Image: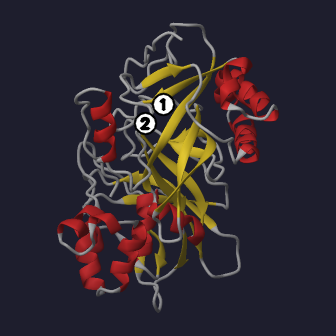
Amino acid sequence: MKGHWAKYALTGAFIALLAGCSSKPTDRGQQYIDGKLEQPLGLVNQPNAKGRPVNGKDFGDQVVQIQTASSGLFGRNNGTYSAVQNWLLSGADTRQLNQFGLNAYQMEGTDNYGNVQFTGYYTPVVEARYTRQGEFQYPIYRMPPRPRGQKLPSRASIYSGGLDDRYIIAYSNSLIDNFMMDVQGSGYVDFGDGRPLRFFGYGGKNGWAYHSVGKELIDRGEVKREDMSMQAIRQWAQEHSPQEVRSVLETNQSFVFFKPEEYVPVRGASAVPLIAKASVASDRSLIPAGTVLLAEVPQLNEKGKFNGKYEMRLMVALDVGGAIKGQHFDIYQGVGPDAAHLAGFYNHYGRVWVLKAAPGTGQPVFSNPQNGNNGSLLLGSN
């Protein structure tokens, strides 16, 4: 569902480039105004962007959450956070970033023309009961012991009762709701007893490879590629029998287990509470936790189509995702059905600049190794 599209090559002179750009796709917010970019992160004097961030307060709230939850993460990035806050208070003119001690590094995008992929994720709210009853027939499981060197049962096996009932922590009224919570990695559960919602945090996986159900439906001709979204998957499920839905879901043998907690804020992999649309999941081998992003995000209409407009947002990388690799960010949209609606549509492109307190010309943006990568992305000079 979170696919990649082909790279495009420069051919001919400038006029040919202009002609070539006109034939490149723009239906998902792609832009080709900066030419071909040669580095994953390229230092620019001024971002070629108009407008000011629309979420300055949310960004400030996210920084406060970082400071409260992770003093180490805050300390490593406080120079950048302070400089960005000062820049915001002074009007947030992108032409003046360097006046506030900030360097901007443009990301090359998935196609080397600056088009960075945006998807969305959210925190679902699932209706459930403690025991199997009435319409509440679909188990949600905690993580069972995993034998050394072995996989746990596949999704198909689990659906067929391959796990002992003692690992069941709730029964929902919707297999597709369970699956959506599985994909998101966590969710809130409403037991319908008037008590506060319980947070079901990520508890582990069964060890099987992930297979995209969205791609499966596209390959079967059930949903057109251009119409694919989480909403499209849910709509397809509503129009088909429980047996057909189960059959398609079983093509993804990966399965997520959950850990019940008291009502707590949604936290990312950095253990920091997430502010909607001010935090993202990133590939930490490229963008470490705590990194500040200035993003030009495409706007979508009520049907999830790009409306031709963009908005500037400041966001912080605080989470990770198995499908989030390279020049790709997953924007956290919040909790519940409204957030699900927007998150389900996003598979679009915009431009992104990493903001970093100026370390001195010629130094790398990030000097610490990340996830086994050699870490340092050396940049050109000003």
In the rendered image, the vertical position of residue 362 relative to residue 102, given as above or below: above
**Nearer the observer, 131 or 314:** 314
The front one of 71 and 55 is 55
Residue at screen point 25% across, 43% down: 6
For badge 2, the amino acid type reads: Asp
Q: Are marks 2 and 1 in contact (CB under 8 Å)?
A: yes
Give the SS element for disc 2: loop
Disc 2 target residue: 283
Find residue 99 and report its horizontal and vertical position in percent: 72, 18
Residue located farthest toward the left when viewing the structure as drawn: 220
Q: In this view, does 271 lie to the left or right of 31?
A: right
For the view shown, which residue lies furthest in the front direction? Answer: 15
Q: Where residue 191 sits: x, y (%)?
A: 60, 77
Sort mark 2 into few (<14), some (14-19) or many (20+) by Cα contacts within 10 Å. many
* Amino acid marked by disc 1: Ile
Q: Which image quadrant for residue 7? A: top left
Report which residue position mark 1 lands on: 287
Picture residue at 51% right of the left edge, 29% below the top: 288
Q: In which quadrant will I find the C terminus?
A: top right
At label 1, counting other C-alpha atoms closer than 10 Å, the crowd grade (few under 14, some 14-19, many 20 or more) is many
Outermost residue, right direction? Answer: 89
Label 2 to label 1: alpha-carbon separation: 6 Å
Q: Is residue 161 visible?
A: no
Q: Which of 123 and 230 is in front in this view?
A: 230
- Estimate the x, y position of residue 376 in percent, counting from the top left: 44, 16
Q: In which quarter of the image is the N terminus?
A: bottom left
Q: Residue 348 carries which label?
A: none
Q: Which residue is drawn at 42% across and 35% down?
A: 114
Left or right of 166: which side holds 366? right
